[in-house]
Image: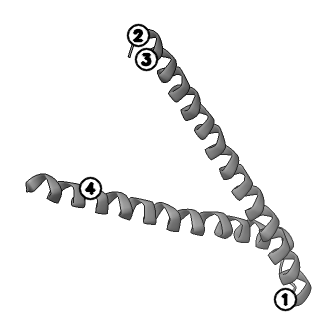
Amino acid sequence: MSGEEDGSAREVMDRAIRRLGVLEYLFLGLAAAGALLAGALVAWLAQQSLGWNFRVTWAVMALLLFVVPGTISWWRIRREEQGSTHTHDHRNDE
């Protein structure tokens, strides 16, 4: 592999990493928008049937619909990373 090929491969890899970063923020934004819309729907239904304040219910439900799944996802990823670290350590001991 020549120096030119190595440089272009690095450029391609850097560009792919940047694109993945953009996609990550895009999905995060879509999740936030979905949480806001779902929170508004729940707040509207709660206002109609239970007489709750729309704005307060919307804020609470949007936060719950965004934070709870995010926390669960973060916890699962963290657990998988710890599991792969422990598995990797045991393989190196042999």
91 sits to left or right of 43 = left
Q: Of circles 4 and 3, which is in front?
A: 3
Q: Are marks 3 and 2 in contact (CB under 8 Å)?
A: yes
- Element at badge 2? helix
Q: From what the image shows, is residue 91 above or below residue 4?
A: below
Decide which of tag 1 and tag 3 comes sooner along the chain.
Answer: 3
Q: Are marks 1 and 3 in contact (CB under 8 Å)?
A: no
Instruction: Look at mark 1 in the image and give the residue it sits on.
Output: 50
Instruction: Look at mark 2 in the image and give the residue it sits on.
Output: 3
Of 61 and 35, nearer the camera is 35
What is the crowding at mark 3: few (fewer than 14 residues within 10 Å), some, or many (at least 20)?
few
Q: Of circles 1 and 3, which is in front?
A: 3
Kind of residue indicated by mark 1: Leu
Instruction: Look at mark 4 in the image and give the residue it sits on.
Output: 85
What residue do we see at 22% from left, 60% from top? 86
Decide which of tag 4 and tag 2 comes sooner along the chain.
Answer: 2
Of 90 and 64, nearer the camera is 90
What is the crowding at mark 2: few (fewer than 14 residues within 10 Å), some, or many (at least 20)?
few
What residue do we see at 53% from left, 21% from top? 11
